Image (cartoon, rainbow, N blue to C red):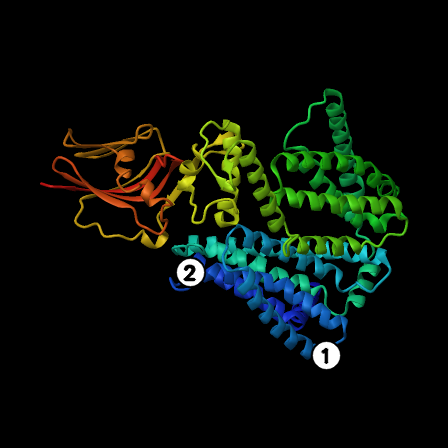
Amino acid sequence: MKRIIEFLKGLGERLLASIQRFWVSLLLPVVAVVLLIMYNHDLISASFEPYWERFTMLAALGFPLSLVLTYVGERFKFKPFLTQMANLILTGLLLIAYYHFWLQNTEYVSVIRYIGISLGLYLAFLFIPPLLRKDETDYSLHIVHLFLRFVSSFLYAQVIYLGTQIILSSFELLFVVQPIPGLGFDFWLSATWIFAPIYFLGGLSGSFDNHLSKSIEAKYPKGFEVLLSYILVPLVSVYTLMLYAFFGKILITRTWPSGVIAHLVLWYSVFSAVLLLFITPLDTKNRVARGFLKFFPKLNLPLLIMMFVAIGKRISAHGFTENRYFVLILGTWVAGWMFYYSIMKKRRNIFLPISLCLIIVLSMIGPWSSFSVSKNSQNQRLHTLLQENRLLENGKIVANPEVDEEVQAEIGSIVEYFHDKHSLSDLKILPQGFVIDDFQDLFGFKYRTFSLYGVRDRDYFSIMLHANDRLFSLDNHDFLAEIISWDSPELSINNGSLMVSFKSDDSILVINLDGEKVYERSVKDLSSTFLSEEDWPFDNKKVYEITDQGRNVTVRYIFKSINGWRTKGSGKIEPNSFNFYLLISNAD
């Protein structure tokens, strides 16, 4: 009992020290959790709805930003109060600036940039405290203990969450209490995003030097050494041999597989680079780790060359996109790191997070960013395709219906890329005000694109009834049923005198009253009265309902969800699955 009390006392002291030192940083996850809980319970007002998602993202971004500013202040030995006040003001100003310039929406570019900047800040959190130290073994130990601290914090948070769930479930069962919807998710958010950061930072109390001294005194965790040296290192070695065998197959068959090599090699190499960092402290006392550190970087370089050839072929054929840009720069970073490990005997591992942080941040901003490079590349690619296929005269696009189907899909894919990820106005060759519906008139052929399965000329759509709209008046209807087309091929509901049947394949709804058919209608045809090309893209905030008449019955449809396809070019709408409420009243 005494040990438990001492443990709880020590835990409380660490948590309190964490809050006192990092209260500005810890305040921001609390804000994010509160906003997410409000959304989970539909407490976001209509006026705030366009902003809550971006405010939540800002609060989450502020957490690593504030941590970095705290460390910078401590590195320059500012007074704690001055550090915290400056941190609060600077974090607020930087988040406001970020919101104004880079988070005006939650579209593709904004989200990717947000992820990149967040990763850069977390990496800065890893290297800023020990930046002026020269003992790299100590730094690797610091990273190992940070990682283990992170894992334990996450696991403890999940134990707390599971414990609260068991208590809640038992309480509801014993006292026959109606469960509160979404409460479990609230507890998970609170445990993962409030308790876990407090506990994690509680292990970093005091200066970095003090924390590092504790890490060195604790030595390398034996269980982690076994995991890395005798499990992960052999697995990575076997995977390396497999890739070399695959490389040999390519050389023998002279057949280059499409779209698989780059990712097969890249992510294994990134993982291996982190593994090299983790096992550096074992270099002098573990033969497996020493051999891996000596030979693996050299063995990895030829595989990375194979990856560069693969991504080079993709870029040569289809130009740059953000994904290819990221694969190229991340591959370059890994290759540089492997080359550095191959030639240097005394290595400064701190360069790993520093260099990765710089590469990530630079790829997000400026004319060399992934977005600028990709847009310029795709603009040039479209211009070349138009010239080669007689679609360009005097700098303007002219229609040519005789273009090969593959080229049509290439052109359509470029237009789709700008439509989905940037803006059609960024395609400089297109006339001002161009929209997708103008595609066939401008180019002379239908709008089609590539997909994983070849040429794709259809858009998938999904309409969902908002939770706030699921309370509606019955208006004196006698019966209410819910029809879900994917539940079964043939659905039949019998309630004495009334029988409702629905066939999923042709979406035919039939109503029989007292054994007599009084209503038959194709729901697919009925939906075409309010799902038309003129309404594209469909409004998910709208309630889609329609009232129809049968013989002696009135039938009201309230659609909970509609899924289907829209053919590009022709604009044909083809719903293929439905979930709707059916309200039936007898005219008699």
Given residues 352 and 152, the one toward you in this image is 352
* Residue 331 - label: none
Nearer to us: label 1 or label 2: 2
Q: Secondary structure at mark 2?
A: helix
* Whether residue 38 can be seen here: no
**Quadrant that contains the C terminus:** top left
**What amino acid type is highlighted by mark number 1?**
Lys
**Do residues under tags 1 and 2 come within 8 Å of each other at their CB atoms?**
no
- On screen, residue 360 above or below 259: below
User: Which residue: 68% across, 79% down?
Assistant: 82
Percent across and percent down for residue 322 are: 61, 45
- The secondary element bearing badge 1 is classed as loop
Disc 2 residue type (three-letter): Glu
Is 431 left, or right, of 122 in this rendering? Answer: left
Which residue ends up furthest to the front in the rendered image? Answer: 394
> Which residue is the site of mark 2?
49
Residue 459 in the image, given as x and y percentages of width and height: 43, 38
Q: Is residue 524 above or below residue 127?
A: above
Q: Position of residue 421 (x, y in %)?
A: 52, 47
Q: How many marks?
A: 2
Residue for point 43% across, 60% down: 50
Q: Which sits in the foreground, 263 or 16?
A: 263
Task: Using the image as rendered, state which of residue 233 and residue 542 is in the foreground.
Answer: 542
Instruction: Decide if residue 63 is on the left or right side of residue 518.
Output: right
User: How far from the left and from the top, in percent, is residue 122?
Assistant: 67, 58
Q: Which residue, given by chain and number where applicable, does mark 1 sit on? A: 79
| Mark 1 neighbour class, 10 Å CA radius: few under 14, some 14 to 19, many 20 or more | few
Q: Residues within 10 Å of mark 2 (few under 14, many from 20)?
A: few
